[in-house]
Image: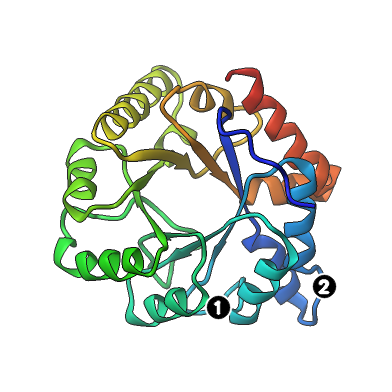
Amino acid sequence: MANVHNPGRLRLGVNIDHVATIRNARGGEHPDPARAAQIVALAGGDGITVHLREDRRHIRDDDLIRVADATGLPINLEMAATDEMLAIALRHKPHAACIVPERREERTTEGGLDAAGQHNRLAPIVARLTDAGIRVSLFIAPEPHQIEAAMRLGAPVVELHTGEYAHAHGEQIAIEIRRIADMAALAAKNGIEPHAGHGLTFENVQPIAAIPQLAELNIGHYLIGEAIFIGLEASVKKMRLLMDEVR
C-alpha cells in the first residue's frame, strides 16, 4: 500500500536508478526496480524518481511502466531536454518531469541545468509537458539567475543541486547551506516550489532538511548503497527519521 502523504512534512523522493544498475551489470531481471518501488512506499517514501538516460545505462523503457504499476506513489521522471525524452514523457505521463543536464561521459548528473542559457530550447519542452498535465521541475544550481530563468520559463518547481554542499569542507559547508537556503527562499517567494538533491547522506542531510522552504528531497545513490548493508526498507526509514527530526 502506498504511503499516505502528510502535506505538512518534508517529502522524500527515492531514486531507484541504481537498483537497475546492479541488475544490468549481470543481465536478467534481478534486482527488480519495481520491487524496490514497493519497498520505498512501505518504508515511508513519498515518491519514486527514475532517470531514463539516452544510453539506458540503468532504468529501461519497460521499467517506467512496471514501476508505475507497482506502486501508487507519484513518479518523477528525470529527463534530458531532448525530443526523444519529451515524447517518452508525453506517452507515459508521470506525475512530474525533472529536466536535468545530461552528458554521455558522466557517471552521474554533474552540476545543474543552465536554464538561463538554454531558455529557447527549454521553453517549448516546458510548455508541452505542462500542457499534458505533467509537473515540470528544473534541476538547477542554487543561483539567483537560474531561479529567475525558471520564473521566465514558468516552471512550478526547481530542484536545487546540493553537490557543492555535499563535497564542501570546513567553513565552506556553512556557506553552501546559506546559499541553498537563500535560493529556496527566493524560489518560494516567487511562487516556485523548491526541492533539493544530490550527494545527500545520513551524515549531511539534516542541515538541508531543516531549510523550511524546501518541500522535497530527492535521494538515490546513497540509499541504494546503504541498502546493501542494512536493507532498502531500513535505509529509507532511517533517512525519513533524520529528515523528520529537524522538521
Is label 1 in a helix, a strand or a loop?
loop
**Crowding near pointer 2: few (<14 within 10 Å), some, many (20+)?**
few
How did the renderer colour the structure? rainbow
Name the image quarter holding residue 36. Answer: bottom right
Q: Is residue 71 above or below residue 86?
A: above
**Which SS class for mark 2?**
loop
The three-letter code of the residue at mark 2 reads His
CB under 8 Å between callouts 1 and 2? no
**Callout 1 amino acid:** Arg
In the picture, measured across the screen, residue 167 lies left or right of residue 15, that is: left
Asked whether, in this view, residue 70 is left or right of residue 49, the answer is right
The spot of residue 175 in percent (x, y) is: 34, 21
171 or 98, nearer to the observer: 98
Name the residue tied to disc 1: 56
Image mark for residue 30: 2
Q: Residue at x 49, y 35 (%)?
A: 166
Q: In front here: 3 or 219?
A: 3
Seen at 42% across and 73% down, the residue is: 104
Residues at marks 1 and 2, CA–CA distance in whole angstroms? 16 Å
Local packing at callout 1 (Cα closer than 10 Å; few below 14, some 14-19, many 20+) is: few
Q: Taking 202 as reference, is 65 above or below it?
A: below
Give the position of the C terminus as an image quadrant: top right
Which residue is painted at 44% across and 40% down in the image? 195
Question: Which of the pair 170/122 is nearer the observer?
Answer: 122
Give the quadrant of residue 48: bottom right
Horizontal relation, residue 104 to residue 17: left or right: left
Q: Earlier in the sequence, mark 1 or mark 2?
A: 2
* Residue occupying image coordinates x 64% and y 76%: 65
